[in-house]
Image (cartoon, grey):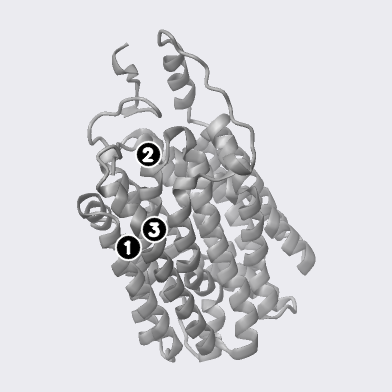
Amino acid sequence: MEDLAIEEEGFIEINLKKKKDKMWNAMYIKAIFIALFVSMCSNMLSTSLPLYIQQLGGDKSVAGMVMGVFTIAALVCRPLYGNLVDTKGRKIVLIIGISIFSLAGLGLGITTSIIMILVLRAIQGVGMSGFSTSIGTLVADVLPPSRLSEGVGFFGVSYNISTALGPGFALLLISLFGYLSVFISSFVICIVGLLLVLTFNYEKKAKRALQAQEGYVEPEKAKLSLKTAFEKTAIPGSISQFFLVMPMGFAMTFMPTFGIAAGIENVGTYFTVFALTILSTRFFVGKLADRYGASKVIIPGIILVLAGTLILVVTKSLDLLLISGFILGLGYGCINPTVMAFIMKVSPISRRGAANATYNASFDAGVGFGAMLGGVIVQAIGFPNTFLCLAGVTAVGFALFLKFFRKQILQCEFDAKQVC
C-alpha cells in the first residue's frame, strides 16, 4: 500500500501522504462552512449580550464579565479537549463542542437573571473550547504542508465573514424583534453546522488504512497531565498572541458601547470594515508567509495593531473609527493566521490537538482578559485612557515576540530538518 495514501472526495488524510499542493477538498470546504456558522453565532452573542446585560441593569464591568467567564471556561477546558482531539478524534469533539455551545445559547433567551446569564455563558465557553480546538486541528490535517499558511488564511475567511455579518445581524434582529430572536437564530444556525459535522467519516478510513500496514502497532494513548496538556513548541507564539489580541477582545465587546459614549452613530460599520479588511489579507498574507517567512509578516502586523489602537484614543467620529478598523484589520489579518499556521507546522502530528489547544488557550485568554479587565478599567478612567493602556499591552506583546517567538521562527527557517 504505497505511502498509505487514502483519497476521499479529493483529499488525503491525517498522517498520510497528501497530494502535492492540493488545498481545496471536500473536508476543507465543509470545515470552512462549519466555522462560518458557529462563529457567526458567537459574534451575534458577543455583540448583543453586553447590551442585554446593561438593559437588565448591569454596568459595563458586568458586561465585560460576560466575555470574561466565557473565555476563562474555554481556557480551563483547553487541555482536556486537546488531549481528546489527539486520542478520541476530531469529529466527536466537534459534536460535543457545538452541542454544548448551541444549547447553552438557547438557554440565554429564557432567563433574565444576570447570574444565570454568566453561568450559561461559562457553559458556552466550554462548548466553544471543544469546537475551536477540534476544527483548527482538522484543518491542519487536510492541508498540504507547503500551503499550510495559505490554507489557514483562507480558512479564516469564515471567521472574517462572521465578524462582518454577525454583529450587524444581531443588532438588526434586536431592533426588529427583540433579544430573544438573536438567541433563537444563533441556535438554529449552530444546528446547521452540527449537521455538516455528522457527514465527516475520514478518520475511520484513515485509521483502517494505518492498521492495514504490515507491522502496525497501535500507539499508546497519553494520559492527560500537566506535561501532555500543552505542547511546548506552541508556547513561544502563544505567549505573544495572548498580549496581542487583548485590544481586539475589548473592541469586539465594547465597540457598540463606545459608540454611544462618543456619540458616534452606525458603529456596526466598524465591524464590517474590520472583517472585510481581514478578509482581503487572506489572498496574500499566507502566500507571503510561506515564501518569505512568518516573522516578515507578523512584525508589520504588530505595528499596525499598535497604530490602530492608538487612533482609537482620539477617535470622536465615524470616519476615524473606520480608519482604525481598517488598520486593525490589516494588523490582525497578518498576525493571527500566521501565528497559528506556524504553530501547526512545527508541532508533531500526534500532538496537533495539544498544540492547537495551547494556541487557542492563549487566544481565548487574551480576548477574554482584554474584555474583562478593559471593562473594569473603562468604568474607572473612560475609553480613551483604556485604549492607551491597551496600546501599552500591544507593545509588551511586541517585546515578547522579539525575545522568544522570533528566535523560534528563525531557528525553524534555518533548520533543514523542519518543514517550515
Numbered disc 1: secondary structure: helix
The mark closer to the camera, 3 or 2, is 3
In the image, residue 278 sits, relative to residue 101, either above or below, namely below
Read off the residue under disc 3.
405
Q: Residues within 10 Å of mark 2 (few under 14, many from 20)?
A: many
In the image, residue 240 sits, relative to residue 320, either above or below, namely above
Image quadrant where one finds the N terminus: top left
Q: Label 2 sits on what residue type? A: Tyr
Q: Label 3 sits on what residue type? A: Phe
Residue sitting at x 33%, y 74% = 304
Q: Residues within 10 Å of mark 3 (few under 14, many from 20)?
A: many
The residues tagged by marks 3 and 2 sit, at their Cα atoms, a distance apart of 28 Å
Image location (x, y in percent) of residue 201: 48, 26
**Which badge, 3 or 2, is on the more N-terminal residue?**
2
Read off the residue under disc 2.
28
**Which badge, 1 or 2, is on the more N-terminal residue?**
2
Residue 278 found in image quarter: bottom left
Read off the residue under disc 1.
298
Image location (x, y in percent) of residue 335: 36, 62
Q: Label 1 sits on what residue type? A: Ile
